[in-house]
Image (cartoon, helix red, strand yellow):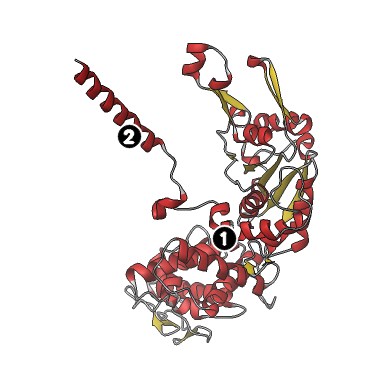
Amino acid sequence: MAKKKSLDESAAAALVAELETDRAPTTKGSGGAILRQPAEVLYADEIAALIQEDKHDKPAGWQMSPRAVLTYICGGKAGKLDITPKYIGHRRLVEIAISTLVTDRALLLLGEPGTAKSWLSEHLTAAINGDSTKVVQGTAGTTEEQIRYTWNYAMLIAHGPSHSALIKSPVFRALESGSLARFEEITRCASEVQDAMISLLSEKRISVPELATEIAAAKGFSVIATANTRDRGVNDMSAALKRRFNIIVLPTPSELDTEIEIVGKRVRELSVSLELRAEVPHRDAIEKVVTIFRELRNGQTLDGKSKVKTPSGVLSTAEAISLLANSMALAGNFGTGQVVPDDIAAGLLHRQDKVNACAAGFLTQPLDAFHSTTGLNSSPPRRTASHGAGRRSQCRIAGVTSSHNPTPPDSSAAVRVAGSGATTRIMRAWRRGFASGRRSRGRRCR
């Protein structure tokens, strides 16, 4: 009997150990098991070097001084180690953001989608606290309990309200430990959920009436929220809540070279982290993509001579990064490992909801026709037939004859159009090709 009991205890112990192993969180040592590491893990060497070399005063709850945080975000030196810039843009805006977090006011990063609001928020919390994972993601389904606290209802029913049955939100844990919490897309939440932040940011404490207690914020607690200007009409923040934030608007890159630098840097980082098995596109390819995106986004060519229909979607810097990363994935898995113009054009031309929809509202023909009419060179499209009444028009767009089954040109030609006015020339060729194609199928020339 004693032997059987011993075997049962051993089996139970093995089962418990197996369950604990299954519940154990994945750590840095697990190699490729983690798709995306938090910033404090990816840049652990830089953070450690900055902490070691930091000689300035540190605010309560901070692991490094504001000057060291600025160096981490904008780049610089820490001893002999080069600190890579995490945010390429207005340095003064970063200084204002860091200074806000030293005070008792919360920080709201506002801007167009793709302007690095979440990216900057994550790196600020990683540098200041070494933990960027206290995040509340704002959605239409976000509830007040996700901002404050909720309960383990099995323990609540069995034992009643207790500290062990309390499930603390990321904001609660940040308040208790004197660290930073992140609130992503705050304007996506319902107004009553947003208003739960008012008393929390004003009084700096959370009341738990079920336990007849209040938890006061430790020094160093603050909140970094983000919001898109495109979501301004979804759930507007109340004036009372806005007063609790210091609002910083992050602009899109003002200079072409700055945006090229941002895109190139992020594409190189994604190439390594995602193991895309393709060479990073050359600068001229990145410049062409960024040029097309900027012209569409600004509604005119870079030289200001021609107007372009502004898209309803957002052709942000993040979209350009995504396009080039997808091009590298195409080249690495289905090509030679070197990104060619056709890889970039494939991703650019097939974004019907963004790029195609912006072409003055006339891109309504199926996409295969768009491919057949964008094989253009630098010269403008020309027509080879006269306009006689009653005669069929035989049109030629950049060497492509309009017919029922046109020979599809190399789609990479659309990307080879470089420099100012690239977008206009692509769209003008499409319009003329589409019009001539319709006429060649039975309509009279006018």
Q: Taking the image as drawn, is residue 34 in sight?
A: no
Q: Which residue is at a point 50% across and 83% down the rendered structure image? A: 381
Residue 245 coordinates in the image, percent (x, y): 77, 42
Three-letter code for the amino acid on which mark 1 is drawn: Ala
Q: Within 10 angstroms of label 1, few (less than 14), some, or many (20 or more) residues?
A: some
Q: Which mark is residue 13?
A: none
Q: Nearer the viewer, residue 410 or 202?
A: 202
As drawn, 434 above or below 108: below
Quarter-of-image position of residue 198: top right
Tell me the residue that label 1 is attached to. 318
Tell me the residue that label 2 is attached to. 18
Q: Taking the image as drawn, is residue 268 in sight?
A: yes
Quarter-of-image position of residue 404: bottom left
Q: Within 10 angstroms of label 2, few (less than 14), some, or many (20 or more) residues?
A: few
As drawn, 347 above or below 143: below
> Could you tell me which secondary element the residue under label 1 belongs to?
helix
Q: Which residue is at a point 64% across and 46% down the rendered structure image? A: 231
Quadrant that contains the N terminus: top left
Three-letter code for the amino acid on which mark 2 is drawn: Glu
Q: Nearer the viewer, residue 31 or 107?
A: 31
